[in-house]
Amino acid sequence: MIKRTRVLAGALTLTMAAVVAAAGPATSAVAAGAHDDARLRTVMDRLTTVDGGPGALVDVRNRRGSTVLTSGVSDIVSRAPVDPRSRFRIGSMTKPFVATVMLQLAGKHRVDLDAPVERYLPGLVRGHGDAVEGGSDGRVITVRQLLQHTSGLPDYLEHLNPQEILEDPLAHRDTRELVDGALAHPSEFDPGKEWRYSNTNYLLAGMIIEKVTGRTYGEEIHRRIIAPLGLAATSAPGDSPAIPGPHPRGYVRPGEDAPLVDLTAFNPSVAGAAGGMISSGDDVNTFLDALLGGRLLRPAQLREMMTTRRTGDPGRAYGLGLESRRLPCGGLAWGHTGDVFGFETASGATVDGRQATVMVNLDPGGSDAQSDDMQRAIRTALCAKPSAHSR
């Protein structure tokens, strides 16, 4: 998808009372030390001024409590501030949820990570005739390669015209047709030889989950993750275009000098298991805490998920639906990023119980500045030293 550009400014706000209410009785709000808090505020302010996002939110949590910082507006017409309890589309942050379900199935020996895709989806992955040897062949590509983006399959989004979505945002997009559209193009490389991000991999992963369990990827995520963890703000909406509960408007900029378009309501079937979910900062943090804490996967499967390979970006590596980034204060942040019409998200968590999730209600835009500052917000939040408490 295209990237983002400058749009409008917004004032930075910190809404502690609402944060405590959203966090629930088990947690208290905790503010970072004055220096770290000021640094995070500065980054959030950049997101809604220099970078051009209408509004932004960062939800930060550690073992001592949680806090939410918001900046800018949730609606460019009403100028309403961003609600700290906001729900939003999480785009590719969906992938760790999907990968977790797949690894749970692997732990029960219902899926073999090193089995060919052909075992679960016979005859489906047969690609472009001019592809490199074995490149788009489900008899060669494994489930593990789907989850780790080493399949070589072309990304269906690179062959989908965003203007078609803008013209008919409520239309259903069939997953099989999206996959077939990708497979009509040459593969990128022989399976396992390289790493390249492809959303097609996770459409296929969702199809495997459905074939093995008899339920959609969304139903399995709800049954295995959402319900057990009590993630009330999280859903896999299927074809529903609505975002339930408090949420900002989601905006896109169709061209460099074009005005913003409100695309809050669109049919997420175009993203599916690659990026169709809705969540909140608090829920994403809860999920990552449970995942890294070993409450969702057995030790062997969690090790598989966190076994990474290089991506070509310094300090970034990719496991099975989960990526790691080096932190300036030491250690790794585990999480994912997400881009989907109207929203960009990023998350990170550490194995010692720190989590941060950031959202901006603009995507696609124009430049990479927004993405860079979202990662800066994650690093700043995870490396902050909490020193004060408030209830």
Image (spheres, grey):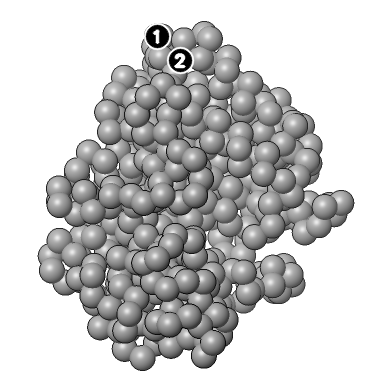
Question: Does residue 18 appear to the left or right of 304 in the view shown?
Answer: right
**Residue 113, quarter of the rendered image:** bottom left
Structural distance between the alpha carbons of marks 1 and 2:
6 Å
* Residue 341 in sight: yes
Question: Does residue 164 appear to the left or right of 324 in the view shown?
Answer: right
Name the spot of residue 147 as percent of width and height, x first. 35, 63
Relative to 298, residue 178 above or below: below
Name the element at disc 2: strand
The one of 43 and 140 positioned closer to us in this rendering: 140
**Residue 391, quarter of the rendered image:** top left
Relative to 258, residue 352 above or below: above
Q: How many numbered marks appear?
A: 2
**Residue 203, quarter of the rendered image:** bottom left
Label 1: few (<14), some (14–19) or many (≥20) C-alpha neighbours in 10 Å: few
Name the spot of residue 34 as percent of width and height, x first. 52, 8
Given contact means CB atoms under 8 Å apart, are the residues at marks 1 and 2 in contact?
yes
Q: Which residue is mark 1?
A: 387
* Residue 203 in sight: no
Residue at x-position 15% and y-position 48%: 299
Relative to 92, residue 183 above or below: below
Label 2: few (<14), some (14–19) or many (≥20) C-alpha neighbours in 10 Å: many
Going by the numbered disc 2, the residue's amino acid type is Ala
Quadrant that contains the N terminus: bottom right
Name the spot of residue 39 as percent of width and height, x first. 57, 18
Residue at x-position 62% and y-position 26%: 43
Q: Residue 32: which disc?
A: 2
Question: Does residue 232 appear to the left or right of 186 in the view shown?
Answer: left
Residue at x-position 48% and y-position 80%: 132
The one of 337 and 154 positioned closer to us in this rendering: 154
Going by the numbered disc 1, the residue's amino acid type is Ser
